[in-house]
Amino acid sequence: MSTARILSISAFKLLFVLFLFSACSESQQKKVNQADQFSDSTFDNHSYSNIHRIKTKHLALELDVNFENKTVYGIARHEMINSGTDTAIFDIKSLDIQKITIGQKGHEKETDFVIGPWDKDSIMGQPLMVKIDPKTSFINIYYKTTENTEALDWLNPELTSGKQHPFMYTQGEAILTRSWIPLQDSPANRLTYSATVHVPEGMLPVMSASNPQKRESDNTYDFKMDQPIPSYLIAIAVGNLSYRKLGNNCGIYAEPELIEACAYEFVDLPKMITAAESLYGKYQWEQYDLIVLPYSFPFGGMENPRLTFVNPTVLAGDRSLVSLIAHELAHSWSGNLVTNRSWDDFWLNEGFTVYFENRIMESLYGKEIADILAKIEFQELQDELEFIGESDHPEDTKLKLKLSGRNPDDGMTDIAYIKGAFFLKTLERDLGRERFDTFLRSYFKTYSFKTVNSEIFLDYLKKNLLEPNESDFNAEEWIYKEGIPKNCYAIRSPRMQRVQWLAKRFTKGEDIFNEVKWIKIKGKKKRKKQIIKLDRNKYITQEWQAFIRELPEDIDPKLMKKLDTELNFRDWGNSEIMCEWYVLGIKAGYFELRPSIEKFLNKVGRRKYLMPIYTALSKDAENLKWAQQVFERAKGHYHFVSKSSVDALLYKN
Ligand code: BES
Ligand code: ZN
């Protein structure tokens, strides 16, 4: 019915053509000027929406999650602030729009709409233009998701821990929310939301909102997010979930089979929250829960407010990867409270968060540990700089990006994360920790529940930190220039140097597994020889990572085998170490690793691990062929985000 209706409205079509003309080919400047008049929203290259004229204030969702046909049936009721326009533009991608009405629930009147052409690069999806009148403030979109809906991952029971129930979750950041909810998908706007969600018997839904801790007999659940958030933070997960409280305002959702392991791994969560609050102010979202998802989740973590989504690879069994939790928690300030206005300013979300994460880690575990973590990151930044420097976009080593016409994913590199964090570390060093912390606290307070860009930050930095202290800090260079400025903070980590030295000795052929020690015996002249076996617990995960990184790329596979015999890197169980080891093994031609690599690629869908492994495999024809075969078998276990990245890598020619 909707198709017939669309085709019959020629007048509205004309309007639409006019829109395309003005929105797409006119200079961006005009839109920016309009924006100034209406709100703090400026032009966002990755949204079609006209938030400078009309914007959603509250979104009420009615969702029916149907696992049988892997479809979400939804009504998105937008309560809008309308400056007097007769057209509202939303973003959609691969959604089936059934009808649109205006007016409050129960007093609705159907209205016309036009769906614009599919964006040629298939990045942004399509604009959905709805005819309204200048006084309209309620727009209701009836829709369902399709099999191409990119945010959603539907998992059959075999891919869960319990293997009895299916699972579903969404990933919204950066611009995928539009593929499961028709909305104005720009971080420049903030909205509150509520949802009524119906799920099949035996399943529990949870959202980035106030969450249930027990089952309802009618399988229908109500959610509320009363604090305004950007659209990329709307999220849902549905599965056979149980809940474990960890502190008075925090806990974990996970499948029952995983809940014990989670409770062990994340025991320090309450301490992290306390540490974060004493650094940069009160936690603003009442509750902080984690949900551990299945292995296909394409990220390590995602900071959905009140409910961080976590990949089970973080469950290392020894709490060695919990800095990821510190990271996602830190986003409750940087990102969720103070949000990047467009994806060109992504570093304001991630750079601040990596900095903050490291401060939480330092508070809990001391400076020595925090420095090892930061040093590991800095090594990654150096590799990234080299890689981007040789790519088609060497300008991507700037913090402030220009991603127009490109996938915002292109900006999600270690530049935003680690260069961003080192910018702040350098500021801290030069201005002093106390002053810098006071400044950051007031920055978070001033811009709470607002959006910011690099220019706003720079201005605030100058007025509140640099000028009062008569500092000539090169902030512009850090933000607008390529590469890493010379004054970058340098981390010294003696512990890291020690393992690097160990790796060097091993490469030279020394026996590092049996250290000879001469022990003095009381009352005797002669010393006694003692052999000390190298124990893998002598070093933490990140030290072993540094050890592996110190080995040469053309290391003799026999030496790798020796390490596997002694230490078993290959099946260590820690995803960071295994990923590092597999990449080295591929480069060095250590083919015996293949069964372990295949097992890993079949199980884990986290893009951070898939990409380096598949990239290393894609360097020579024979490995590439094998990688393609593995990928074809494994890709059904990956979320769209990972699947599409790996696909593009393995089939680029
Ligand atoms: N917000 C990001 C994840 C993200 C970024 C999703 C861009 C989509 C687009 C999250 O906070 C994150 O950075 N996760 C990292 C972990 C972190 C410790 C660096 C990850 O998933 O590896
Ligand atoms: Zn992050």
Image (cartoon, helix red, strand yellow):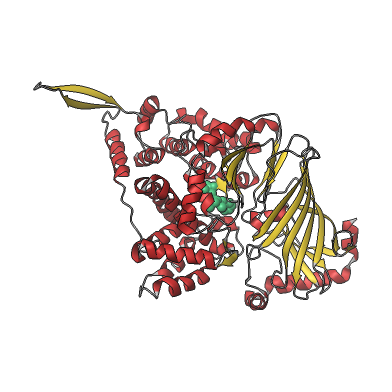
State the residue in front, 311 or 595: 311
State the residue in front, 384 or 433: 433
Residue 137 horizontal side relative to residue 428, left or right: right
Residue 109 horizontal side relative to residue 612, left or right: right
Image coordinates of residue 406 in percent, x first then y, are 60, 60
State the residue in front, 451 or 72: 451
Residue at 46% from the left image edge and 68% from the top image edge: 480
Image coordinates of residue 202 in percent, x first then y, are 75, 34
Residue at 63% from the left image edge and 70% from the top image edge: 43
Image coordinates of residue 482 in percent, x first then y, are 43, 64
- Against 499, residue 105 (above or below) is below
Residue 310 horizontal side relative to residue 67, left or right: left
Splitting the image into 4 quarters, where does residue 409 fall?
bottom right
- Against 569, residue 252 (above or below) is below
Q: Residue furthest left?
A: 525
Quarter occupied by the N terminus: bottom right
Splitting the image into 4 quarters, where does residue 113 fall?
bottom right
Image coordinates of residue 385 in percent, x first then y, are 43, 56
The number of discs equals 0
- Against 616, residue 276 (above or below) is below
Residue at 47% from the left image edge and 63% from the top image edge: 441
State the residue in front, 98 or 432: 432
Splitting the image into 4 quarters, where does residue 283 fall?
bottom right
Examine the rendering and report whether any part of residue 356 can be seen: yes
Examine the rendering and report whether any part of residue 622 can be seen: no
Q: Residue furthest front?
A: 248
Residue 610 horizontal side relative to residue 2, left or right: left
